[in-house]
Amino acid sequence: MKLVQPQLEELKYRKKLLKDKKTMAFNKSNGGIVDFNEKIWKPWYALWMNDSKHYYAYIYDETLNKYIGEVSYHFEEEYQEYVLNIIIEYQYRCLGKGKTALELLCKHAKENGLRFLCDDIENNNPAKKLFLDLGFKEVWSRENITMLKKRL
C-alpha cells in the first residue's frame, strides 16, 4: 500500500467515500454521510495541498489496484495539536489495511517534522483498539470522545 496525493479531478473518489452510508456509519453522531460538493473542491484542494499545516492523501492498495480510503492530518487550533483522520472503505476494514495506512501516515508525518499525531475518537468506535495497538495513548476523555496521542 502507499499514500497518494490526488489531483483535483480525482476528488470524485472522496465524494464517493464520504457519501457511502456503511463507510461513514462511524460518523453517525455528526450526521453520518458528508456532502463533498464539487463547488468547494478548488478551495478545499488549495488548502489541503498547499498549506504546510495540512496533509491529505488517498490510500492506494497495490494488490487491489485501487483506492480504498483516505488519510490526513491538520493542525487543530482548539487542541494545539496535529489531528489525523483515517477512513477505510467499509468492505476493506478488519483486514489489516487500516493498520498499514495508519503506519504510513505516521511515518510521513515524522518525515515532515511532526513530533506527535493525535485523534479525537468516539469511545464506541472500533478503530480505537487499532490506535491503542499502534502505540497511541489516551490523554483525555470527555463525554463520548477520547483524545489519543502518539509520539512519532
Image (cartoon, rainbow, N blue to C red):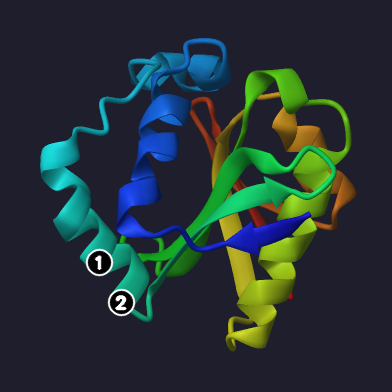
- Using the image, determine if residue 125 lies above or below residue 128: above
Instruction: Point out residue 32 in the picture as x, y percentages from the top left corner.
Output: 40, 16
Residue 86 can be seen in this image:
no
Quarter of the picture containing the N terminus is bottom right
- Using the image, determine if residue 11 lies above or below residue 54: above
Instruction: Point out residue 40 in the picture as x, y percentages from the top left corner.
Output: 15, 45
The residue nearer to you, when weighing 49 against 145, is: 49
Instruction: Point out residue 111 in the picture as x, y percentages from the top left corner.
Output: 67, 85
Q: Measure the C-alpha gap from mark 2 to mark 1.
A: 6 Å
Q: Amino acid at mark 1?
A: Leu
Which residue is depicted at the point 23% across and 67% down?
46
- Using the image, determine if residue 79 lies above or below residue 31: below
Return the residue at label 2: 50
The residue nearer to you, when weighing 103 against 132, is: 103
Q: Amino acid at mark 2?
A: Asn
Q: Residues within 10 Å of mark 2 (few under 14, many from 20)?
A: few
| Left or right, 147 with reference to 137 | left
- Which secondary structure lies at badge 2? helix
CB under 8 Å between callouts 2 and 1?
yes
Return the residue at label 1: 47
Which residue is depicted at the point 58% across and 85% down?
112
